Image (cartoon, rainbow, N blue to C red):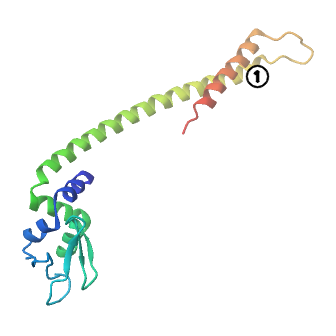
């Protein structure tokens, strides 16, 4: 929808809108405001004919807000109406579909990477817990001076896995 809005706002002027929906501008470029009852034209355009303002009722905005107010539509409905009335619809639908396919593919890739990371993290956590158990099993007892080689390996394994886990926190 964002691309459609940019195209509509960039390519349509208030004069285009007035002509399409049957409003005649006077020599000064004003029309009789369709949003309140009046006899003299008080709705004019400004900002390179991209915005409008009624000096009678105070309403104003851009091409989309004019169509919203004129037909009682919400923003999305007004964009669709303008797209259909001015021939932007087919390209926008194609672009939107292509962008949706691209977003789905990107999301699938992100989920795949996230799953691979989760598996790696789980693997490191499992090895860390196994090292903790081995450390408990081979911990030297009081009075025994020599440390068992498996205890030393378990301590080193715990340190390595702990450092990896600290550097790659699961979020």
Vertical order, 89 against 114 (above or below): below
Q: Which residue is mark 1?
A: 136
How crowded pointer 1 is (Cα within 10 Å; few <14, some 14-19, many 20+) is rated as few
Q: Quadrant of the C terminus?
A: top right
| Total numbered badges shown on the rendered structure | 1
- Residue at figure coordinates x 82%, y 11% from the top left: 147
- Residue at figure coordinates x 6%, y 74% from the top left: 22
Vertical order, 31 against 11 (above or below): below
SS label for mark 1: helix
Vertical order, 85 against 73 (above or below): above
Vertical order, 8 against 37 (above or below): above
Locate residue 162 relative to residue 19 in the image: left or right.
right
- Residue at figure coordinates x 14%, y 82% from the top left: 32
Residue 79 location in percent, x, y? 20, 61
In this view, the residue farthest toward the right is 143
Residue 97 quadrant: top left
| Front in this rendered view, residue 2 or 11 | 11
Locate residue 164 relative to residue 149 in the image: left or right.
left
Residue 159 location in percent, x, y? 69, 22
| Front in this rendered view, residue 57 or 143 | 57
Q: Quadrant of the N terminus?
A: bottom left
Residue 169 quadrant: top right
- Residue at figure coordinates x 76%, y 9% from the top left: 149
In this view, the residue farthest toward the front is 28
Locate residue 50 relative to residue 164 in the image: left or right.
left
Residue 39 location in percent, x, y? 14, 90
């Amino acid at each position: 929808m964002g691309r459609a809005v940019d195209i509509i706002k960039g390519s349509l002027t208030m004069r285009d809108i007035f002509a399409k929906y049957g409003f005649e501008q006077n020599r000064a470029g004003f029309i009789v405001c369709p949003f309140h009852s009046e006899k003299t034209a008080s709705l004019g355009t400004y900002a390179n004919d991209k915005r409008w303002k009624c000096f009678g009722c105070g309403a104003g905005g851009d091409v989309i807000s004019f169509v919203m107010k004129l037909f009682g539509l919400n923003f999305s409905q007004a964009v669709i109406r303008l797209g259909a009335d001015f021939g932007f619809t087919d390209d926008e639908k194609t672009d939107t579909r292509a962008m949706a396919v691209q977003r789905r593919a990107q999301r699938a890739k992100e989920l795949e990477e996230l799953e691979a990371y989760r598996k790696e993290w789980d693997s490191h956590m499992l090895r860390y817990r196994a090292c903790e158990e081995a450390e408990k099993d081979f911990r030297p007892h009081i009075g025994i001076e020599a440390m068992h080689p498996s205890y030393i390996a378990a301590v080193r394994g715990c340190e390595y896995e702990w450092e990896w886990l600290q550097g790659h926190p699961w979020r």
